[in-house]
Image (cartoon, rainbow, N blue to C red):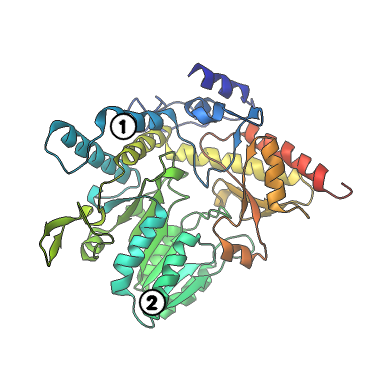
Amino acid sequence: MAETMTGARALRSAGDPAVEVATGDGPASAAGRAGRPFDPVALRADFPILSTLSHGRPLIYLDSAATSQKPLTVIDAVDRWNRVQNANPHRGIYELAESATNAYEEARARAAAFIGAPDARELVFVRNATEAINLVAYAWGRQSIGRGDVIVLTEMEHHANLVPWQILVQEADADLEFIPFDDEGRLRLDVLDVLLRLKPKLVAFTHVSNTLGTINPVREMTEMAHAAGALVLIDGAQAVPHLPVDVAEIGCDFYAFSGHKMLAPMGSGGLWARRELLEAMPPFLAGGDMIREVHLRRSSWNDVPWKFEAGTPDAAAAVGLAAAVDYLAALGMDAVRAHERDLTAYALETLRREIPGIAIYGPDADHRGGVVAFNLPDVHPHDVAQVLDRHAVAIRAGHHCTMPLHERLDLSATVRASFSVYSTRADVDVLVEGLHDVMRIFGPGA
């Protein structure tokens, strides 16, 4: 811990404001953060990797939209599981196995409560949002979508909320339609209104764009879709870690999220769906734990959610997800959103002021999550990323699994900086310093 604290203090910036934190329901293990001012610099001490060096410099991690870093409480929860709790949930009746089952199901309850699920049994554990969306495309889609049916998506979708539907409509001889976005990166709801006249079976869209950062009006879009008789699936991978999410208030039918983007281990995530939909859907995968009875020529299925959780689960990842939920709840998601909104506004203002000719894509900070995608004039994003790496700044360069979005913008790639609870104004300042170096190397007259 002492080494970690040293690394955090080395990166301290007096310009990073504290945000008041609402009291959360997480246990004391959630860094004791509930009710304290939100101080992202102090939070850095909870994340061991942020005290490490890259190219001899303190790591500046600005790729949280790809995967977030993990606090000690999550690391310790997974380690504790592997040391003293490891057993196969739902299998044994000895004490350790029953303890493992209880820990696994308690993790489900905590994750379900975090997203406002009315019933924990409506939350299916999956490896990530990609698996969650594929589950719906397979189990709901293949019995609900037929020839000539319409599914409505958007032009800003991650490939995970595009490719499964492409495969489905090709198999079913159905159709895809798309909601465009305007020059500010905001969805055209007037076009959605027109597309709904086609009576689609499903409208699926991202809550927060992983490239533009756009926070979509999910409740309004859900109401519009339901009025037209469509079901609604929301990709919440970039929303659950960054702002308050209440699936009951949104009113959607399916909601997918990934644990590894919300401070939890890779291999954790969830699909929330209304119970009547889960009851009606056939299994996605078959094998152990999703069965009630198996005979040589027939089988019957377990209750939901276990009907969709075949095989031995990654229980350690689920326990880590619960620890991450506790950590975020202790911070207060309103405070998390306020911090990232302020940091994003600072980044947008600073980049535009300091970097001549920079092109930034997406809306203003009030309508944007903690994501800033940009390009420098006449410099390829991969070159930008390589130079920034020398400054120990970790950013993403490429299409960010949104190739159609980039085609819409007539771009092959962008540079993306993305934030989390541990990101600071000092991080943005180092990013800008690195971009000055990029311009020195590749700019006019270089």
Pointer 1: what residue? Answer: 82
Give the residue at x 35% y 30%: 79
Give the residue at x 41% y 59%: 234
In the image, residue 366 above or below residue 251: above
Q: Residues within 10 Å of mark 2 (few under 14, many from 20)?
A: few
Q: Amino acid at mark 2?
A: Glu
Q: Position of residue 246 (x, y in %)?
A: 36, 49
Q: Position of residue 426 (x, y in %)?
A: 64, 32
In the image, residue 130 above or below residue 175: above
Of tags 2 and 1, the one toward the viewer is: 1
In the image, residue 359 above or below residue 152: above
Pointer 2: what residue? Answer: 171
Is residue 252 in sight in this rendering? no
Q: Residues within 10 Å of mark 1 (few under 14, many from 20)?
A: few
Q: Which mark is residue 369?
A: none
Give the residue at x 53% y 37%: 339
**SS label for mark 2:** helix
Distance, label 2 to label 1, CA atoms, is 43 Å
Q: Which residue is nearer to you in this view: 311 or 162?
A: 311
Farthest residue to the top: give it. 2
Q: Quadrant of residue 325?
A: top left
Is residue 328 in sight in this rendering? yes
Farthest residue to the right: give it. 445
Q: Quadrant of residue 139?
A: bottom left
**SS label for mark 1:** helix
Give the residue at x 56% y 45%: 370
Q: Position of residue 311 (x, y in %)?
A: 25, 51
* Mark earlier in primary sequence (2, 1): 1
Q: Amino acid at mark 1?
A: Asn
Q: Position of residue 76 (x, y in %)?
A: 37, 28
